[in-house]
């Protein structure tokens, strides 16, 4: 065997399974992708009109793919790692046996990775399988359930992490929203990207999940059946076999010497125990702690009313036992009366005490910033006809001043009319997002184009064409009027 078998804790056995998956990574993931990729592409094409159905089907078919790492590890444990072709051929019989159960009721079993070796490798059915699982799951099922929960969260974190990485690397001037990147189902490319990221996260985590369940299975059988002791005896037998013929001759001589010793008449009959003696010896052996069976049963039992008064109790105790319940009932009635009086008083005085809980919020008056990122937004700093002045500046070759005037005028109109309340430390991106929530789609599209033109000329020194500037000047009055 390629695995050092010994009794381990649950988490140590899970770590062993992860190591087994890494050791046989080439065989596992090679056969995994050879089966997964063609089927995933086919499912995606069939579910093109319903994009959310493709990842759901792949998730539901996980038990079918789980046979691949299980088949590889069950052979690699005994030093016979199969090839990709051998693996794909070997999982076919496993699919025919119990795949229907795993895709129906067994799909909701949180100990699926631990139970799968019992069904597929031992090939047990019906009552025998239930009895076998009851024995193996004792003191081990909790570890298998926690393994499922942890791996499920790790798969979700990997999926989210891929989207976060893509979002961080995406150019910020494209204004891509993360919620749209992760949840959008109206764009074919985005749905294909979501599907691909889910396949990557599942393919990375699922073989480790199956390998850890298989390691828990090996550890449980080692504890119950003493596999580590059996392997030690096999190695001892191999070492003894190397002695060869001398040991055989020695054993033969010893046997002949024992046979040659004469046995007294009646000695054999005297040494043979009777049936009653044998039963007594067997009973004594079975009383040892090694043969004890621990079983815990819980059931409901009606205890009934038990009297606390003994016949020999004195009279004062009987009187006290009658007086205390009456006193308790009197106190209970008194408390209910006090509660009723308190509720009635609160209702009568509600206009007085409710004002204590009134929350008075002082909303500070909003002061429009006079400047944003170095641009003066005061109305007196702007000309009367902003588009015409900006066009004259553009004709004179002052593109930066022309775009600055259009951009300042749009911000001043937007702020002074109370369409939004940007802070004094807002940036161009913040203003664009605020404008997107308050303006019409046409005005938002114009403001986005104006912002990008201003950023290109302000930070990159790239001036727009004369036609583009003319279009910005003509459309400015449509959305903001003639003046700010």
Image: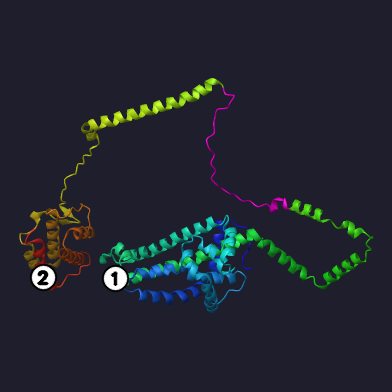
Q: Position of residue 126 (x, y in %)?
A: 56, 65
Q: Position of residue 255 (x, y in %)?
A: 87, 67
Quarter-of-image position of residue 41: bottom left
Q: Residues within 10 Å of mark 2 (few under 14, many from 20)?
A: some
Which residue, given by chain and number where applicable, does mark 1 sit on?
187
Query: Which image quadrant: the N terminus?
Result: bottom right
Q: Is the residue 295 above or below the residue 20 in the image? A: above
Of 315 and 389, which appears nearest the observer? 315
Assign the magenta stretch its main secondary structure. loop
Q: Residues within 10 Å of mark 1 (few under 14, many from 20)?
A: few
Q: Residue furthest top?
A: 316
Report whether 230 appears left or right of 314: right
Of 116 and 25, which appears nearest the observer? 116
Tag 2, which secondary structure? helix
Q: Is residue 95 magenta?
A: no
Q: Residue furthest left?
A: 384
Q: Nearer the viewer, mark 1 or mark 2?
A: 1
Of 207 and 258, which appears nearest the observer? 258
Which residue, given by chain and number where applicable, does mark 2 sit on?
470
| Residue 212 visible | no
Question: Which numbered disc flags the more N-terminal residue, 1 or 2?
Answer: 1
Q: Residue at x 40, y 64 (%)?
A: 159
Report whether 386 appears left or right of 42: left
Q: Which residues are magenta?
A: 286-313
Q: Residue at x 81, y 56 (%)?
A: 275
Report whether 124 appears left or right of 451: right
């Amino acid at each position: 065997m390629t695995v050092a078998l010994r009794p381990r804790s649950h988490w140590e056995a899970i770590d062993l399974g992860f190591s087994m998956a890494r050791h046989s990574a080439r065989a596992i993931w090679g056969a995994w992708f050879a089966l997964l990729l063609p089927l995933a592409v086919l499912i995606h094409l069939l579910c093109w009109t319903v994009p959310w159905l493709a990842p759901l089907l792949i998730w539901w078919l996980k038990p079918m793919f789980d046979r691949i790492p299980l088949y590889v590890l069950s052979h690699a444990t005994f030093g016979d790692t199969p090839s990709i072709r051998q693996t794909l051929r070997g999982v076919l019989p496993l699919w025919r046996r119990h795949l229907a159960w795993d895709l129906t009721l067994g799909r909701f079993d949180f100990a699926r990775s631990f139970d799968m070796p019992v069904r597929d490798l031992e090939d047990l059915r019906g009552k025998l399988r239930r009895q076998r699982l009851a024995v193996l799951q004792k003191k081990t099922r909790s570890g298998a359930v926690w393994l499922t929960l942890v791996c499920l969260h790790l798969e979700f974190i990997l999926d989210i992490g891929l989207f976060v990485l893509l979002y961080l690397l995406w150019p910020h001037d494209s204004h891509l929203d993360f919620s749209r990147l992760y949840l959008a189902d109206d764009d074919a490319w985005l749905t294909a990207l979501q599907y691909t990221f889910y396949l990557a996260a599942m393919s990375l985590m699922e073989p480790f999940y199956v390998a850890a369940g298989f390691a828990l299975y090996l550890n449980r059988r080692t504890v119950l059946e003493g596999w580590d002791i059996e392997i030690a005896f096999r190695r001892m037998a191999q070492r003894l076999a190397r002695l060869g013929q001398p040991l055989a001759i020695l054993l033969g001589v010893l046997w002949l010497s024992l046979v040659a010793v004469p046995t007294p008449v009646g000695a054999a009959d005297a040494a043979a125990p009777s049936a009653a003696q044998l039963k007594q010896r067997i009973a004594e052996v079975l009383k040892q702690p090694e043969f004890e069976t621990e079983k815990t049963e819980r059931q409901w039992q009606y205890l009934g009313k038990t009297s606390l008064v003994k016949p020999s109790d004195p009279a004062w105790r009987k009187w006290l036992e009658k007086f205390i319940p009456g006193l308790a009932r009197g106190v209970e009635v008194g408390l209910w009366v006090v509660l009723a009086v308190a509720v009635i008083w609160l209702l009568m005085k509600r206009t007085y005490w409710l004002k204590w809980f009134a929350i008075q919020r002082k909303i500070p008056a909003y002061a429009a910033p006079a400047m944003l990122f170095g641009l003066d937004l005061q109305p007196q700093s702007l000309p009367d006809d902003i588009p015409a002045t900006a066009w004259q500046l553009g004709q004179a070759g002052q593109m930066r001043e022309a775009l600055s005037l259009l951009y300042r005028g749009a911000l001043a109109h937007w702020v002074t009319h109370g369409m939004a309340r940007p802070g004094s430390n807002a940036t161009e991106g913040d203003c664009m997002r605020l404008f997107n929530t308050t303006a019409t789609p046409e005005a938002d599209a114009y403001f986005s184009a104006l912002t990008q033109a201003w950023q290109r000329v302000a930070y990159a020194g790239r001036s727009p064409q004369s036609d583009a500037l003319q279009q910005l000047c003509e459309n400015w009055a449509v959305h903001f009027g003639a003046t700010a």
